[in-house]
Image: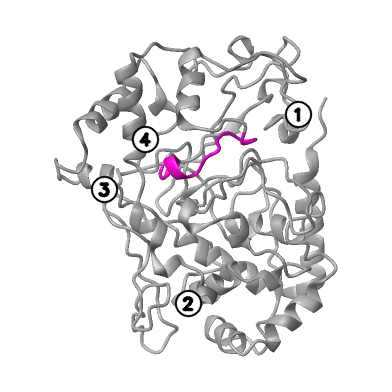
């Protein structure tokens, strides 16, 4: 049986190191890795329609909502959401603020956050690719290849849990520990270099003011706890809901072509069953937002592999099973959002499917046939495969229409929104 994998070890290592770095500044965590006082749950509501970004820009053009006066208290956050989008869930110990978002934007794109100053969060999450990176799998700052594809950060504020197959990471604040401090594999490689990295930030002329504005209640806000809080706040603003589909859904009948409208009908048909795993305003699996009242997890085996004729996935990554040790969780991964999917390839947890056309072909067949090599096998025969991946038949025109609809989920404004862009490139 597979071990629990490097991600659980990375999380445990990161928590211990962060405690050393931050001392009492680190909030207590429950068994699932949530901050104390945070609520959990998942669900979905509404249907996305139009609008891009999650917050207004202040007069300086910085990311974040305009400040709202609250009788001398720190400015309150005002979400500017696309119609039909619920308010994101935000942990009580990390309330949103425009100053935190702006600090987080700088940190997200700053290579000095990596030990060897070669990578930033933005290195693997590029705005033009909807915060994916276009590679099969990324490499960390030391050159070590990771085992999983860099998923889009589109609407990460609603993702529950985070990552491809780890229910132990329910919040952005906790997930950020992994790329910062994980050692197997190394991503940013901050472990053991905390003082050095904090020193770099202190020495930059911009950061004292940014940190002080984000955390005015602290005499010394230069800690990794505050770094991860600011990063989480920035990532929560990566909200996309301004695609042609959204405009069509809001009543603009000219927003979609005839082919895209036919593709929309095909997508929602029971013959294909796409909407059972990619549903709601986010076209994803389980989500979490401020109005969530019921916790739900959704992982699926989509028949990509069957390397032993008994349902096994390649040993390098066997999905949810590595966390739960449940045999039927072999090869199960979280259904990611389809928003901006046309620009986030290659696809699947391991980046092994190059194009959307290939993705459609795999689902049409009811699973992938790998004809030779170490991963040879017929995924369509995988006994752990989801019942929703049963195969279907499309005409050439219907395939074109379905692909056209998926392309209509691209939010061009989101891909170029200056509020989400690299401040060091300005």
Rounded to the nearest angstrom, the CA distance separating label 4 from label 1 is 35 Å
Q: Label 4: how many residues lie within 10 Å, few (<14), some (14-19) or many (20+)? A: many
Q: Which residue is mark 2?
A: 426
Q: Earlier in the sequence, mark 4 or mark 3?
A: 3
Q: Which residue is mark 3?
A: 49
Where residue 347 sits, quadrant-wise, is top right
Q: Which residues are magenta?
A: 339-351
Rounded to the nearest angstrom, the CA distance separating label 1 from label 2 is 48 Å
Residue at 35% over, 79% down? 58
Q: Which residue is mark 4?
A: 406
Front residue (pair 98, 242):
242
Residue 36, position as x, y percentages in the image: 63, 61
Q: Which residue is mark 1?
A: 325
Rounded to the nearest angstrom, the CA distance separating label 4 from label 2 is 32 Å
Task: Determine the secondary structure under disc 2.
Answer: loop
Q: Earlier in the sequence, mark 2 or mark 3?
A: 3
């Amino acid at each position: 049986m597979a071990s629990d994998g490097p991600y659980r070890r990375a999380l445990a290592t990161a928590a211990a190191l962060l405690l050393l770095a931050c001392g009492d500044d680190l909030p207590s965590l429950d068994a699932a890795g949530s901050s104390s006082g945070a609520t959990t749950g998942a669900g979905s509501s509404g249907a996305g329609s139009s609008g891009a970004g999650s917050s207004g820009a202040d007069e300086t053009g910085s990311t974040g909502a305009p400040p709202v006066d609250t009788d001398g208290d720190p400015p309150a956050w005002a979400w500017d959401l696309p119609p039909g989008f619920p308010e994101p869930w935000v942990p009580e110990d990390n309330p949103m603020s425009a100053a935190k978002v702006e600090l987080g934007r700088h940190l997200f794109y700053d290579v000095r956050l990596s030990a060897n100053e070669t990578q930033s969060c933005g290195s693997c999450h590029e705005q033009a690719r909807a915060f994916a990176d276009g590679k099969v799998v990324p490499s960390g700052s030391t050159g070590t290849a990771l085992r999983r594809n860099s998923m889009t950060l589109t609407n990460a504020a609603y993702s529950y849990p985070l990552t491809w197959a780890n229910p132990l990471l329910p919040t952005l604040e906790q997930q950020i520990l992994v790329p910062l401090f994980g050692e197997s594999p190394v991503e940013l490689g901050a472990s053991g270099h905390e003082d050095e990295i904090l020193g770099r930030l202190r020495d930059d002329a911009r950061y004292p003011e940014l940190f002080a504005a984000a955390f005015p209640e602290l005499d010394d806000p230069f800690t990794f706890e505050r770094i991860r809080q600011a990063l989480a706040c920035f990532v929560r603003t990566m909200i996309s809901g301004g695609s042609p589909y959204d405009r069509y859904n809001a009543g603009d009948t000219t927003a979609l072509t005839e082919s895209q409208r036919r593709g929309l009908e095909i997508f929602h048909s029971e013959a294909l069953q796409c909407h059972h795993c990619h549903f709601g305003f986010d076209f994803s699996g389980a989500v979490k937002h401020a109005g969530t009242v019921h916790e739900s997890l959704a992982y699926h085996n989509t028949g990509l592999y069957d390397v032993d004729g008994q349902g096994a996935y390649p040993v390098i990554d066997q999905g949810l099973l590595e966390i739960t040790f449940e045999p039927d969780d072999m090869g199960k991964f979280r259904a990611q959002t389809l928003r901006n999917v046309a620009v986030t390839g290659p696809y699947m947890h391991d980046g092994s499917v190059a194009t959307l056309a290939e993705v459609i072909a795999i689902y049409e067949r009811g699973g992938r046939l790998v004809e030779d090599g170490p991963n040879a096998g017929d995924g369509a025969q995988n006994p752990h495969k989801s019942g929703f991946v049963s195969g279907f038949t499309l005409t050439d025109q219907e395939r074109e229409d379905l692909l056209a609809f998926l392309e209509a989920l691209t939010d061009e404004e989101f891909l170029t929104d200056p509020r989400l862009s690299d401040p060091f490139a300005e």
